[in-house]
Amino acid sequence: MPFSSLFSYPLSSPLLTLQNVVPSYAMCKEMNKPNTPQTYIHNIYVSIIQTLSGLFFCPKYTYRAISSIEGIVVSARSQKIRRIEIDQYTGLIRKVSEPTGVADVVLKDELIFPGFIDLHVHAREDMSHTQEYKEDFRTVGLAAINGGVVALADMPNNPIPPIDDKSYEQKGNLAKKSPIPVVLYAGIGPNTKPLSKKVPYKVFMGPSVGDLFFNSLDELEAVIKNYQGQNVSFHSEEPEILEKNKNASTHEAKRPPEAEISAVDFALQLIEKYDLVGKICHCSTLEGINKIISAKKRGIKVTVEVTPHHLYFDETMLGGKRKSFQVNPPIRQTKENRLALISMLKNGNIDYLATDHAPHSVSEKEKGISGLTHLDTYGPFITWLIKEHRFTFEEIVRVCSKNPSDFINKFSKDQYGEIKEGHIASLSVIDMKKPINISPKMLKTKCRWSPFLGITFPGSVSMTIIKGKLYEK
Ligand SMILES: [Zn+2]
């Protein structure tokens, strides 16, 4: 096995244990503003715990370098048994050819997909270092690998958001500790301007998690004007409608479907008027998707994401667990809406499966905070789409690899989305014959919580390959 090597990434589970022992401290940290004495003390606390946990207690995630793999290769058009040769120096695919039966890895029934890409992740780490008890770039990368995800795009609603060249570069330096490539969104907020280099942008139309949002649509348009022609993703919930419903009895009723539908309308107007390359994040309503479909037909440059939680859960399934499932936009009311989203993803009207992985501590979730975790369960969730909703492998490639690669390739030096010569050797291997039960033990996200805890998915991720480095289960 040429160039074979063994490495490992420690995972700081004791940090989580400590965090659960001192939940009140964790909650205080959430309230801290950057550059306060408390933040300073907190940073020291995090560094000590992370160092100790890394050194002594952590489970290891090992990888080895491979230069060839054979098995069933899935593309956007077909499935064929192929041999993939990998250049270990560049991490790129050197050649795709007929199988020989002899390779570093020879697979029988497993499916080799072009690596899955998650375009919507909150990795939490930023220059304030106040939220690393929830997640950091290292653990988010491990959770991604665990779920078969080979690259991700990270959202900017941090305590110190990346909104200009300097803050973007500083956060980029932190992201280098991730074991998988990370593309950062830059934030658009009141008074921001485009960066000097080409990056994707994210705008929060109304309040969600973090301080980066607008209070009115007029205020938003005044800033978006400066971003003519740029790539902008929208969190679409209209601030005025959220304000009007703020005293409703449930989280779901506080953020009703109209807030999203109306905001999608306005986002589409802005995309058209300022010639943006637009993306609507986590669309959760059939009406919202329909507006996007007709905008696409009119030639507007817009694509749309959907999350696993809006596909899997509806309000009838929440029972007494409403707080655990609190998320923005919220879980929607009807099964019909949910099933419609699934068929929209299957038939190509929705472009991406993007998770909105947004980790919080268990104690924070119990108190009620918006955001769910997903990266660890990305691959298993896909097997549910295949088995329960008859997604073809080719449809999975489209929404998990190919379409996301069309987005991310513009901001990455490597090319994703296809298994072919010159593309990145980052692959997701799925075993449809090995079900997996989601338990805290199998999770690598720092918060060790998932909305799918206790659920068994019909298949699992058997290995993830990142630039020729194989992470095995
Ligand atoms: Zn989000």
Image (spheres, rainbow, N blue to C red):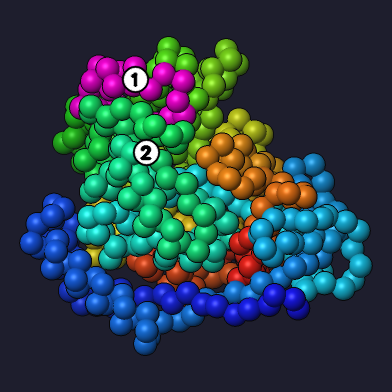
Q: Is mark 2 within 8 Å of ligand 1?
A: no
Tell me residue 15's x, y (percent). 29, 75
What residue is at 61 percent from the left and 62 percent from the top? 466
SS category of the residue bearing label 2: strand
| Residue 325 appears in the picture as rendered | no
Tell me residue 164's x, y (percent). 31, 37
Hey, which quadrant is residue 50 in on the image? bottom left
Q: Quadrant of the N terminus?
A: bottom right
Comparing 47 with 71, the one in front is 47
Comparing 84 with 58, the one in front is 84
Q: Quadrant of the C terminus?
A: bottom right
What residue is at 26 percent from the left and 54 percent from the top? 127
Q: Which residue is mark 1?
A: 226
Relative to 386, residue 268 above or below: above
Comparing 51 with 333, the one in front is 51
What residue is at 19 percent from the left and 71 percent from the top? 44
Residue 186 is marked as 2
Tell me residue 438's x, y (percent). 50, 68
Relative to 7, residue 127 above or below: above
Q: Is residue 209 magenta?
A: no
Q: Which residues are magenta?
A: 214-239
Query: In the figure, is residue 224 to the left or right of 190?
Result: right
